Image (spheres, rainbow, N blue to C red):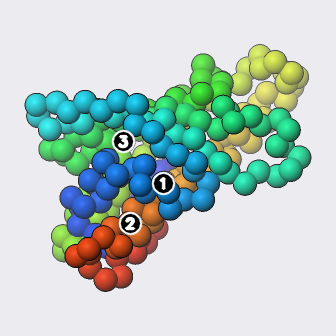
């Protein structure tokens, strides 16, 4: 299943690029449903490419009925990202810490100049593959409907959360000294 999102921020491309790549742990402090992002490793290559491995921990507001079934480790994932400065692209892969062998999610995020160079258009595109066959405790007759429901949920959630991340980056950049006034993000 395809996931995508386009957002425009009123900050120059280089500022947005650096905020998402280098200041992600600060950016997520502005999000209410992410507990933390921890940089597990960072490798800078001679051509300027930066390989990052980040560990994300979520803290979403869950309905009381599911809190007994959802454990903290189910709400974490490893984000492997390669930031390519020549093309201003980030090629990424998310690896959930729960059902990792059944969920594949990867894609690319492009950062392009917008608003005459005063802004940034961020295009987030990826593919999500779920394999919920033979899942313990799920009758085979429910596997298809369950997979469809989970896909629809994730396909709506991931782009929405990415737009919120960009809005938080815009807020962080607006609060920095010398930032242009009104540097809010606009989700598209």
**Mark 3: few, some, or many residues within 10 Å (few <14, many ≥20)?**
some
Asked if labels 3 and 1 touch by Cβ distance under 8 angstroms, the answer is no
For marks 1 and 3 on the same chain, the one whose residue lies earlier in the sequence: 1
Q: Which residue is mark 3?
A: 108
Which quarter of the picture shows residue 101?
Answer: top right
User: At which x and y percent is residue 74?
Assistant: 67, 33
Name which residue lies at 77% across and 30% down.
144
For marks 3 and 2 on the same chain, the one whose residue lies earlier in the sequence: 3
On screen, 99 above or below 89?
A: above
Name which residue lies at 68% across and 51% down.
60
Q: Which residue is mark 2?
A: 172
**Residue at mark 3 to residue at mark 2: CA–CA distance:** 23 Å
On screen, 81 above or below 99?
A: below
User: At which x and y percent is residue 188?
Assistant: 45, 67
For marks 2 and 1 on the same chain, the one whose residue lies earlier in the sequence: 1
Answer left or right for 69 relative to 180. Answer: right
**Mark 2: few, some, or many residues within 10 Å (few <14, many ≥20)?**
many
**Residue at mark 1 to residue at mark 3: CA–CA distance:** 20 Å
Asked if labels 2 and 3 touch by Cβ distance under 8 angstroms, the answer is no
User: At which x and y percent is residue 125?
Assistant: 42, 46
Q: Which residue is mark 1?
A: 28
User: At which x and y percent is residue 155?
Assistant: 60, 47
Name which residue lies at 60% across and 27% down.
97
Which quarter of the picture shows residue 85?
Answer: top left
């Amino acid at each position: 299943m395809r996931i995508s999102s386009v957002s425009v921020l009123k900050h120059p491309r280089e500022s947005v690029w650096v905020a998402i790549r280098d200041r992600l742990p600060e950016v997520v402090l502005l999000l209410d449903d992410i507990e933390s992002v921890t940089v597990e490793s960072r490798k800078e290559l001679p051509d300027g490419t930066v390989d990052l491995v980040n560990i994300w921990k979520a803290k979403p507001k869950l309905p009381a009925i599911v809190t007994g079934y959802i454990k903290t480790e189910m709400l974490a994932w490893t984000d492997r990202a390669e930031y390519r400065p020549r093309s201003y692209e980030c090629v990424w892969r998310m690896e959930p810490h729960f059902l990792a062998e059944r969920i594949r999610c990867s894609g690319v995020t492009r950062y392009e100049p917008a608003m005459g160079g005063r802004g940034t258009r961020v295009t987030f595109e990826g593919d999500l593959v779920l394999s919920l066959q033979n899942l313990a405790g799920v009758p085979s007759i429910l596997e298809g409907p369950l997979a469809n429901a989970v896909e629809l949920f994730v396909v709506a959630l991931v782009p929405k959360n990415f737009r919120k991340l960009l809005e938080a980056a815009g807020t962080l950049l607006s609060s920095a000294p010398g930032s242009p006034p009104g540097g809010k993000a606009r989700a598209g």
